[in-house]
Image (tube, helix red, strand yellow):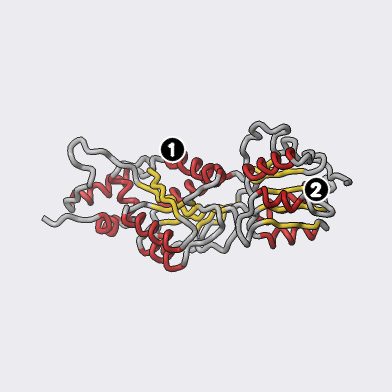
Amino acid sequence: MILANVRQIAKLAGVSPTTVSLALHHHPRISEETCKRIQDIAQSLNYVTPDSKPNGPIRAPLIGYLADKAPDRLAMDMLRGAMEDATRRHFGLLLHEVAHCEGWIEEAITTLIQRNVSGMIFATSYPRLLPPFLLRRVRIAGIHLVQVMHAVLPSPVDSVCSPDADYAQVCCGTLHALGHRRIMLLNLTHPEIWEGVSQRYGMALTCFGQPEGIADPETLFAAYVHMTPRPTALIAHTDEAAMRCHHLAQCSGIAVPAQLSILGLGNASGGQLDPELSVLDMKACEMGRVGMNLLIDRILAGHPPALLTDHAEIKILPTLIDRGTLGPASLG
């Protein structure tokens, strides 16, 4: 007896291998007609599913999720959104953490392909794209891929992004309206974008960290107290860093926001701060949800990824939430 495999069934049914896998697991998003047609073909070919043993578990189709090895709060919120919608749509999530090096990413991609995932999400805090040779490997394996990131890069795959230029515009525009003309940035990626936006508003910009590396709030404040004239506003790359800057300002006798306005990127609660922290809500959880739903829609459509030419680029716009650490620029 010759046993068929999923790819042979897919060829006969005129669908993708992923659609076959979903149909054999009775996934609710596959129509009854398609399920019956695929199951009839599988039965005629004597196909035996790995889960067809008596009382064996029925496993949900898997989606691979590549995330930073040391995720920040934004990355965790993004993962939470992706997990919730994967569960809601009856998919399992296989998390694989990667470091900032090509070797780790290649190992993760290889592992996920070997696990027969139906799709992959590449979600990292630091903006980057998959190397072309790894992208080809994913496509050859017939796996759909969605990139989720806090930047806009010329991605050759479907992507969900939060554009740097948009949140630079929101931050600089808000601070300019409050009279600020000298601002500091802590560890924000693509400082050239911020420089361009700030120049349009006639604002002087001082950057700490990025692209040279990650600077800590203590380093920033050690330099800040000796600046003449001092910047009147600070934008930090996470709200955790902004909270730390708030604490250092209080310890240094610098009134917030009377002498220094502070804004964090993210949307954590203000904790024990008084006033609570003003933030730019990066919509990380929403980005995870949108990315997961885009990927699942691609999987269920059944079109091979190698044939897709209409790659989607979905932009999630941030929202500024003023909780009290933004104020008019100090005249001192």
Q: Residues within 10 Å of mark 1 (few under 14, many from 20)?
A: few
Whether residue 300 appears in this view of the structure is no
Which of 293/75 is in front? 75
The residue sitting at the left extreme is 1
Q: Which residue is mark 2?
A: 232
Residue 120 rendering spot, x and y as whole percentages: 42, 53
Q: Nearer the viewer, mark 2 or mark 1?
A: 2
Three-letter amino acid code at disc 2? Thr
In the image, taking residue 168 as reference, residue 42 lies left or right, namely: left
Query: Whole-percent x and y of residue 180?
Result: 82, 49
Asked where in the image residue 305 lies, by quadrant, the reply is bottom left
Q: Earlier in the sequence, mark 2 or mark 1?
A: 1
* Residue 123 placement (x, y as % from top left): 50, 52
- Name the image quarter holding the N terminus: bottom left
The Cα atoms of the two marked residues, 2 and 1, are separated by 46 Å
Q: Amino acid at mark 1?
A: Arg
Q: Residue at x 28, y 59 (%)?
A: 11
Q: Secondary structure at mark 1?
A: helix
| Nearer to the camera, 328 or 170 | 328
Could one spot residue 264 in this view of the protein? yes
Residue 114: % across, % down: 31, 56
Asked if the residue at tag 1 contacts the one at tag 2, i.e. Cβ–Cβ closer than 8 Å, the answer is no
| Residue under the point 56% across and 56% down | 126
Drawn side of residue 177 relative to residue 322, left or right = right
The residue sitting at 63% across, 61% down in the picture is 211
Q: Residue at x 46, y 40 (%)?
A: 85
**Could you say which disc has been placed on residue 88 in the image?**
1
Residue farthest right in this picture: 331
